[in-house]
Amino acid sequence: MARSNTRRMNLLRDEFLAEGRKQSESDDPEVRDLSECWLCKMPIDYVADPHSTDDSHNLDHYFIVRDYPELEEDVGNFRHAHRLCNLNRGTKSPSLGLGTAVADWW
C-alpha cells in the first residue's frame, strides 16, 4: 500500500519531528531518551534535514502501514528512528534488544 502524502500527514510528520527536536534539547535525561531512535536507542541527528543522512530523523510506525493502514496517521503509532535503522527494519518486526537468542540446541 502506498503511503498517503496528505496535508494532514505532512503536518503530523512535521509536528512529530519538532517534538523530537525539543525532547533532544531537554536537560532532563528521561525526556531526552524519548527523542532517541526507538530501534537502536542511540541519539538522532536532529540538525540534519530529515531523511538526508543515515543518522537523520525518520518517522517510523510501530505497526507497519502495509498491515495497518488505518494507523498511518495515528500519532500513538509514531516512533522516532534513524533513517538507516528504519530502512534496515523494513517491514520486519523490530528487535528491541531483549537479549541474545538462546542457541537452537538449548
Image: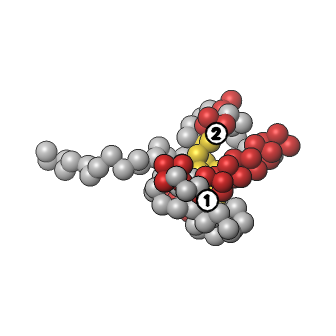
Q: Is residue 81 visible?
A: no
Between discs 1 and 2, the one toward the N terminus = 1
Identify the residue at horizontal 66%, vertical 56% (top origin): 21
Image point 70% across, 40% down: which residue? 1
Secondary structure state at the residue bearing disc 1 = loop
Residue plotted at (47% across, 43% down): 93
Which amino acid type corresponds to the residue marked 1 in the rendered image? Glu
Residue 49 position within the rendered picture, expressed as x and y whole percent measured from the top left: 72, 66
Q: CA distance from mark 1 to mark 2?
A: 30 Å
Using the image, tell me which numbered label, if any, was put on residue 65: 2
Using the image, determine if residue 77 lies above or below residue 95.
Answer: above
Q: Residue flagged by tag 2: what amino acid is it?
A: Val
Q: How is the image coloured?
A: secondary structure
Label 1 neighbour load within 10 Å: few <14, some 14-19, many 20+:
few
Residue 28 screen position, x and y as percent? 52, 52
Q: Secondary structure at mark 2?
A: loop
Q: Taking 91 as reference, is 67 above or below it?
A: above
Residue carrying label 1 = 25
For label 2, the crowd category at 10 Å Cα-Cα, with few meaning under 14, some 14 to 19 and many 20 or more, is some
